[in-house]
Image (spheres, rainbow, N blue to C red):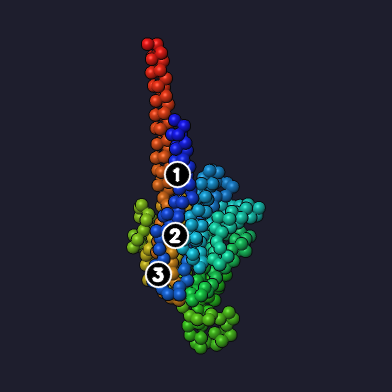
């Protein structure tokens, strides 16, 4: 009996270690870089982590989902060794509501969960849950996020041989608002820098331009909102259980804002927000990848991308993460085996005692 109980403890412990520590390594080790480009920038791209704040969600929900993301992120970085990580907004679930003290607590949790090696830079674009939708933007909230995450809003960064543009989707309503006017001016400057790198002698404006780019390449656009599409009917690949229908400026950028961004002449676009994966051609005729949520809280089958970039060329692999229902099934199966074993032991013990009493009477 004691031996059986000991074996049961071993099985329970092994199940816990496998689910909580080893499963991500087993599953994510099956992911592979595209390996189609030489001397490329290798990027892990994920979205919609939605770290819970002080107002919504149960403490166990917060603990469980954040532990899952921590283990998945560290396994992905350890196994695949990227040059850079991009997180496409909605890092926080309640970023637009929390005060300064809770925002600092948010930042500490974020940097603890998504703690990459020193040689791996983590960039984050801004989402509606980080600062609010367009209609409720406030300078304090916008600046707070921008100060915490440098180059997160309407900026161009160059990594090795590729240009990346990080956009603030909430400032692209094209309605002349204070934030929108500044955003459009910043995007026009980025476009000018790219055009001057492509044709440096085209105008006198290029000769007097500060922060000239060392080379030209069509940029990679990263933002929270997908560019305009009516629905997921346009997806060549998708993992949503149903075809989603989208509203302009809520689930996707407006058609007008999308057309405005065409001045950047991007090679490819990446977005999040919908919580589901989609690969499509947008209205620019450019391939766009909408990335599923990284959290079990939003999706039973989360995923992220492994992407390679060399100037204007790119190659992308979708990396599926462990499914939450798989983990639940493993725990239920183990629990059922243990419970049935306990019932068997108890029943056998009772039968043995009854048999012994009968023998004594005889």
Of tags 2 and 1, which is closer to the observer?
A: 1
Q: Which residue is mark 1?
A: 15
Q: Determine the secondary structure under disc 2.
A: strand
In the image, residue 11 sits, relative to residue 352, either above or below, namely below
Decide which of 68, 13 is in the foreground and name it. Answer: 13
The N terminus sits in image quarter? top left
Decide which of 45, 350 is in the foreground and name it. Answer: 350
Q: Residue 334 has which mark?
A: none
Residue 214 x %, y %: 53, 81
In the image, residue 186 sits, relative to residue 253, either above or below, namely below
The C terminus sits in image quarter? top left
Residue at 48% x, 47% y: name it.
Answer: 17
Q: Which residue is mark 3?
A: 35
Residue 257 x %, y %: 47, 67
Residue at 43% x, 62% y: name it.
Answer: 305
Q: Which residue is mark 2?
A: 304
Precedes in sequence: disc 1 or disc 3: 1
Q: Determine the secondary structure under disc 1.
A: helix
- Residue 26: image quadrant is bottom left
């Amino acid at each position: 009996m004691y031996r059986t109980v000991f074996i049961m403890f071993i099985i329970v412990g092994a199940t816990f270690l496998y689910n909580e520590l080893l499963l991500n390594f087993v599953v994510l080790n099956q992911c592979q870089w595209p390996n189609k480009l030489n001397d490329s920038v290798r990027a892990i791209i994920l979205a919609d982590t939605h770290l819970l704040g002080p107002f919504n969600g149960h403490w166990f929900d917060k603990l469980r989902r954040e532990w899952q993301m921590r283990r998945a992120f560290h396994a992905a970085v350890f196994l695949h060794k990227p040059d850079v990580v991009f997180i496409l907004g909605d890092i926080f679930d309640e970023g637009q509501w929390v005060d300064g003290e809770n925002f600092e607590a948010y930042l500490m949790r974020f940097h603890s969960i998504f703690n990459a090696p020193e040689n791996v830079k983590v960039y984050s674009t801004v989402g509606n849950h980080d600062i609010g939708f367009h209609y409720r933007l406030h300078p304090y909230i916008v600046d707070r996020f921008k100060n915490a995450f440098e180059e997160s809003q309407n900026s161009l960064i160059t990594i090795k041989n590729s240009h990346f543009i990080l956009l603030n989707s909430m400032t692209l309503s094209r309605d002349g608002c204070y934030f929108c006017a500044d955003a459009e001016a910043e995007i026009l400057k980025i476009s000018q820098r790219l055009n001057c790198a492509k044709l440096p002698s085209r105008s006198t404006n290029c000769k007097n331009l500060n922060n000239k780019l060392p080379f030209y390449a069509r940029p990679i656009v990263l933002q929270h909102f997908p560019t305009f599409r009516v629905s997921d009917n346009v997806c060549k690949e998708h993992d949503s259980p149903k075809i989603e229908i989208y509203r302009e400026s809520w689930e996707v950028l407006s058609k007008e804002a999308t057309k405005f961004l065409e001045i950047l002449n991007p090679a490819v676009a990446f977005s999040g927000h919908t919580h589901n994966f989609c690969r499509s051609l947008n209205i620019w005729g450019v391939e766009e990848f909408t990335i599923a949520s990284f959290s079990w809280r939003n999706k039973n089958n989360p995923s992220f991308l492994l992407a390679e970039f060399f100037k204007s060329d790119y190659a992308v692999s979708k990396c599926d993460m462990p499914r939450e229902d798989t983990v639940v099934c493993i725990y239920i199966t183990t629990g059922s085996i243990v419970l049935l074993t306990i019932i068997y032991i108890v029943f056998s013990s009772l039968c043995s005692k009854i048999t012994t009493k009968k023998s004594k009477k005889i």
